[in-house]
Amino acid sequence: MEKKTWYLASIALTCLFALSKAAGTPAMFIFGDSLIDDGNNNFLPTIARANYAPYGIDFGAPTGRFCNGLTVVDYGARILGLPFVQPYLSPLSKTPNILKGANYASAAAGILDETGRHYLGTNLVIMCLDVKGGRMTFNGQIALFEKTVKLQLPLLIPDAGARSLYLARSVFVINIGSNDYINNYLLPGLYTTSREYSGDTFADHLISNLSQQLMRLYRSGARKMVLVNIGPLGCIPSQLSTSNGNGACVERINELVIKFNERFLSLYTTLNSSLPGSFFVHQDIYQTFSDMIRNPANYGFRVTDRACCGSGRFGGDVTCLPLQPPCASREQYLFWDSFHPTQAANAIIADRCYSPGAPDCKPISITELAQI
């Protein structure tokens, strides 16, 4: 029986590498928050879920994606020739499907462990990890990946050298940090960070933690990493609803994000030059969103300051509720709900980074990264 298992695993690995040769990468491993959570929070005790209609209205059914349809990483996987990457907590992500990668992203997660804790006050022990506040923190996501490397992959790729090669050829996407502002620093009634840190020192604090987290991924075998900066949070409906303006972006919030992004770019540059065998790509999603807001007609958008599904000012006071009727022309809206872009926006974001010659990924596109 043991010989048969090894034989089947060997065949699976051989087929995987053969099929992925054209695509350039055997797998995607995804870390982050609700922007790219494909359903992990469905399996957690939390109110930070999107497993109800009208979420998924253009997907065919609610899946846990915080969108009307596909996320950026869904489009990215398609461009790279891979299937949709399964949420790690889903039974579908277990062996041998995990050879195509796994999505560890969790809605409400942040760089800091405390971020998003208000989504649930109790703890759940799952897979030997504490899931606190109804989300998997970035540190928790990395711990699950470390478990994947130590316990799951050896069953499918027994040879250590082959495992290292598999991980080195895989693409790792890290999109984290937005919640450290909108679900931490900008909520002074629930968190103390805005009283403990200035905008500059809070950005330093986040980058210090993020640097250590990325090093953990590197030590576990990650070599091709896509680092996504934070978008203009002052322009999302949830923040517009708190301002006294007429729909213009809240510059005070965007200035905080810019402080982080400047340090984020410096971290990317440092890591790219200091970690042997690694190759980092910087995705400037701040630039992508800013351009869509400034020039909406170029992208087919008519509404950029209001959620397609939401209530209150700019649709941002209360996010999309169960069975709430969304807007009819979803492809003309930049934002789906109070926080997240529409499927139409996600397609553009992916195209501007994954496709060869894409303008918002440096120094190369993710497709070109996959071919290295």
Image (cartoon, rainbow, N blue to C red):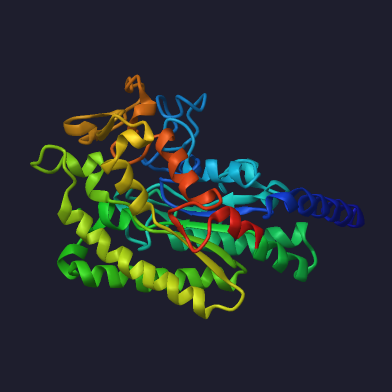
Q: Is residue 188 visible?
A: no
Q: Is residue 6 visible?
A: yes
Nearer-the-camera pick, 1 or 201: 201
**Exactly how many numbered labels are in the figure?**
0
Q: Position of residue 137 (x, y in %)?
A: 42, 57
Nearer-the-camera pick, 288 or 184: 288
Q: Position of residue 72 (x, y in %)?
A: 48, 44
**Relative to 277, 326 lies left or right:** left
> Residue, x 53% and y 50% (percent of image)?
354
Determine whether 371 is above or below 307 in the image. below
Determine whether 345 is above or below 287 in the image. above
> Residue, x 43% and y 54% (percent of image)?
360
> Residue, x 33% and y 19% (percent of image)?
325
Q: Going by the picture, which residue comes out furthest to the left?
A: 244
The quarter in which the C terminus is drawn is bottom right
Determine whether 264 is above or below 286 in the image. below
> Residue, x 30% and y 58% (percent of image)?
180
**Relative to 224, 152 lies left or right:** right
Q: Position of residue 226 (x, y in %)?
A: 50, 60
Question: Residue 307 falls in which quadrant of the image?
Answer: top left
Determine whether 152 is above or below 206 in the image. above
Nearer-the-camera pick, 144 or 225: 225
Q: Position of residue 321 (x, y in %)?
A: 31, 28
